[in-house]
Structures are given as structure tokens and as C-alpha cells.
Image (spheres, rainbow, N blue to C red):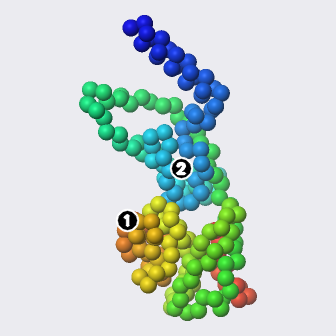
């Protein structure tokens, strides 16, 4: 009994030292930045999804509260009892949208859908889809809303190479799952023979 008590006490002491010395180990939310809507990551036994929110009147991307991932237990008698954790405020990533010149007007003729790459608001290379039809010009993010893979143009529409989700190439609507949401639509305008998107 003494041996077990010493082990428990030793483990508690080591855990306390680690969380004081390395506070990142005690962080309640994923340490990576939430960069795009629908992005998923696992952290400390939970599955987190990147969602939109508001902070001081600005649109922000932040992690949701996370879903506990089920772990099969050896027997019902060893099931852990839930413990309440203190509420910790998290600092959301503020999203400052920018206008990006994406293509020349002549590059997207009527009845066509084209894919373009440009630097996004984070300064990283991103893929966007432009479609022109009788309803006008539509701009969409090429990020699949299922798990964040980049969709590509195919004969059937906009196809996700990761899990085969399919989106309408004219408007980004879901044609086939597992994606449940359409591609994100972006503000778009044309001026002086140039197409601009806001992202």
C-alpha cells in the first residue's frame, strides 16, 4: 500500500513540475492555429473543429469546445468518472480580410469554371475557384468542408481527392458526401479587366 501511495505521489509531483515548467502541456485547446473553416485536429483525447465566431465585431476563426473521442474500455467497472474542469478563456485568431487580385476578366469566359492560386490573408498559397454563368461570377474557396483537402476540377464537378466528396462547379453546392456543407463563397468584383476576391 505504501509503495502504491509513493508512486501516486511521485507521479503527481512530476506532473505538477511539468505543467509549471512547460505551460503548453496544460493548454486546454490545440496549440496549432485554427486556419480555415472545417479544419479538424485532435488534442488530449478530443476532436476539435475550426468554426467561425465573432469577437469585438470582427469575424474570427476559433476551435470549438471539442468532442471527446470514444475509447473502448476493458470493463464497465473501470470507467472514469467525469471531473469538472475550470473555465479557461481562449484568445481567438482575428481574421483581417483582404482583397486579392485573382485573375483577368478574359481568363474566365462565360460558362466556364477555373481554378486559381494566390496568397491568402495569412500570406500562404491558397486555391480559389471562379465560375461564370448566366447568374454572373461566383468565387469559392477550394477547401473541402469535410476535412480541409483541396478540391480539383473534374468532369463531374469539383472533386475532393481525400474522401470523394463532390461539389457543383457552378456554385459549390454539395452533390455527394461525406461533406455536409457547400464550399465557402467569397465576395467577388470586377474592375478594369481584373477579378478581385475578398478573403
Q: Can you say which quadrant of the picture contains the C terminus?
A: bottom right
User: Element type at marker 1?
Assistant: loop
Q: Residues within 10 Å of mark 2 (few under 14, many from 20)?
A: many
Instruction: Report whether 132 appears left or right of 190.
Output: left
User: Label 1, on which residue?
Assistant: 178
Instruction: Report whether 102 appears left or right of 51.
Output: right
Q: Nearer the viewer, mark 2 or mark 1?
A: 1
Mark number displayed over residue 63: 2
Instruction: Identify the residue at the far top of this view.
Output: 2
Q: Residue at x 49, y 54 (%)?
A: 40
Instruction: Identify the residue at the far right of this view.
Output: 192
Residue 32: x and y, percent? 60, 48
| Residue 18 shows in the view | yes
In-front residue for pair 80/188:
80
Q: Residue at x 54, y 38 (%)?
A: 28
Residue 121: x and y, percent? 68, 64
> Measured along the vertical axis of the image, is residue 118 above or below residue 135?
above
Amino acid at each position: 500500500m505504501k509503495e502504491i501511495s509513493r508512486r501516486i505521489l511521485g507521479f503527481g509531483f512530476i506532473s505538477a513540475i511539468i505543467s509549471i515548467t512547460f505551460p503548453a502541456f496544460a493548454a486546454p485547446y490545440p496549440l496549432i492555429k485554427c486556419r480555415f473553416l472545417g479544419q479538424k485536429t485532435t488534442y488530449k483525447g478530443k476532436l476539435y473543429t475550426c468554426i467561425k465566431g465573432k469577437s469585438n465585431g470582427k469575424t474570427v476563426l476559433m476551435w470549438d469546445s471539442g468532442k471527446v473521442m470514444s475509447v473502448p474500455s476493458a470493463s464497465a467497472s473501470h470507467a472514469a468518472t467525469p471531473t469538472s474542469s475550470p473555465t479557461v478563456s481562449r484568445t481567438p485568431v482575428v481574421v483581417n480580410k483582404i482583397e486579392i487580385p485573382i485573375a483577368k476578366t478574359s481568363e474566365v469566359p462565360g460558362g466556364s469554371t477555373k481554378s486559381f492560386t494566390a496568397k491568402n490573408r495569412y500570406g500562404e498559397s491558397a486555391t480559389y475557384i471562379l465560375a461564370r454563368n448566366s447568374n454572373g461570377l461566383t468565387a469559392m474557396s477550394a477547401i473541402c468542408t469535410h476535412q480541409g483537402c483541396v478540391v480539383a476540377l473534374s468532369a463531374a464537378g469539383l472533386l475532393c481527392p481525400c474522401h470523394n466528396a463532390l461539389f457543383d462547379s457552378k456554385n459549390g453546392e454539395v452533390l455527394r458526401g461525406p461533406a455536409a456543407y457547400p464550399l465557402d463563397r467569397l465576395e467577388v468584383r470586377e474592375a478594369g479587366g481584373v477579378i478581385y476576391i475578398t478573403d
